[in-house]
Amino acid sequence: GAPRIAVRDLRIWYGTGGAPVRAVDGVDLTINAGQTVALVGESGCGKTTLGRGILGMLPPSAAVDGEVVVDGVDLAHLPPRRLRAMRGLRIGLVFQEPMTRLDPLMRIGDHFDEVLRTHRPKMSRAERERESVAMLRSLGIPPSRIRQYPHEFSGGMRQRIMIGLALVLRPAVIVADEPTTALDVLVEAQIVEILAELRRNADCGLLLITHNLGIVAKAADRVAVMYAGHIVEEGEVDRVFSEPAHPYTRELLRSTISLDTSDLHYIPGSPPDLSAPLSGCLFHPRCPDAMRVCQSRDPGQTATAGGGRVSCWLHRLDELEPADREPLPD
Ligand code: SF4
């Protein structure tokens, strides 16, 4: 499919009086029509900030640089009013607590009608009804139920309806941020399954922000691994999971796989302070494979199989002098 969204050299930082906190630092990411890209990493790695940057939902204290191009339009530089309009039209958000967003006093058809009336003011009433009925059909809900109220539907149907309300505007991408507290992991898995099924027909891209690697393995085509505001590895899910190219990806996968065997594996150390500049590879203080060069020089990006990429000196060994390759003392 064609790219629906292209993020280029995106930087998002918070000026907190002291040194700025660089939450997202030079990120490139493309999502094609019909594609699901998962964004994974430990909490605090910048994945939620990146998602909010794409949605144009950053707090006023955030500064943004770089491009977020959706269907050829650069959202990062739009004035706030046009951005709000574009956001509703081009980028759908799957709410973290879908059950609470359906108005119990409104019929299902009126929910769809309201979304279309707000974002597509030129549509006639008949067109809105046609679109609503078509969406209900693709959700597997008989159009005859259009006049029913939310409580007349099962929980799973209500989830479908919520997702349908995001898809009825035919967005370029849907951003699904991981549930915080209200939804348990089972519901997250159900929602992702419905999304993965529907977005193929809808021809939109899906950005899935999650720490649940089981869901990523099941639903995503590609995965981007984020560490300290950078994407350190990106590629096809199968390749990344079977042959992780970055030591951080390898450790992240190990920590999750061990959860099932109740043998908890934590990645030693903690992510760097994003307000204090660190030279070289940002993972070097925690990396079991760190070499001398990793302390001082940024590894840049190296292409991997399947059109992926990795930022790690282990993939550029032939460029290094023997002294650069010496292991870092602990
Ligand atoms: Fe580890 Fe060096 Fe690769 Fe960074 S560049 S992940 S420190 S081996």
Image: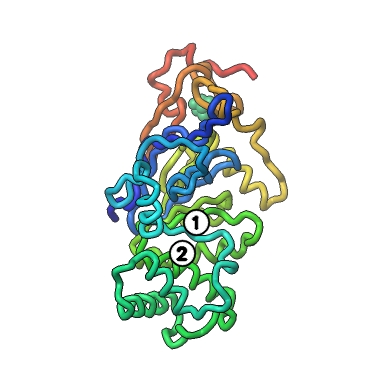
Q: Quick one: which residue is furthest to the front in this view?
A: 81
Please provide percent x and percent y for residue 85: 37, 56
The answer to whether residue 330 is left or right of residue 297 is right
**Quadrant of the rendering where the C terminus is positioned:** top right
Q: Real-space Cα distance between discs 2 and 1?
A: 9 Å
Tell me the SS state at disc 2: helix
What residue does disc 1 label? 176
Q: Quadrant of the N terminus?
A: bottom left
Residue with the most extreme bottom position: 144
Residue type of the residue flagged with mark 1: Ala
Residue at point 49%, 60% (across, down): 94
Circle nearer the N terminus (2, 1): 1
Query: Which is in the foreground here, disc 2 or disc 1?
Result: 1
Residue 262 makes an appearance in the image: yes
> Mark 1 near ligand 1 (CB under 8 Å)?
no
Q: Residues within 10 Å of mark 1 (few under 14, many from 20)?
A: many
Foreground of the two, 246 or 275: 275
Q: Which residue is mark 2?
A: 195
- Which of the 4 image quadrants contains residue 220? bottom left
Q: Amino acid at mark 2?
A: Leu
- Residue 125 location (% of width, % of height): 33, 78
Question: Farthest residue toward the top?
Answer: 323
Residue 103, x across and y down, in percent: 55, 73
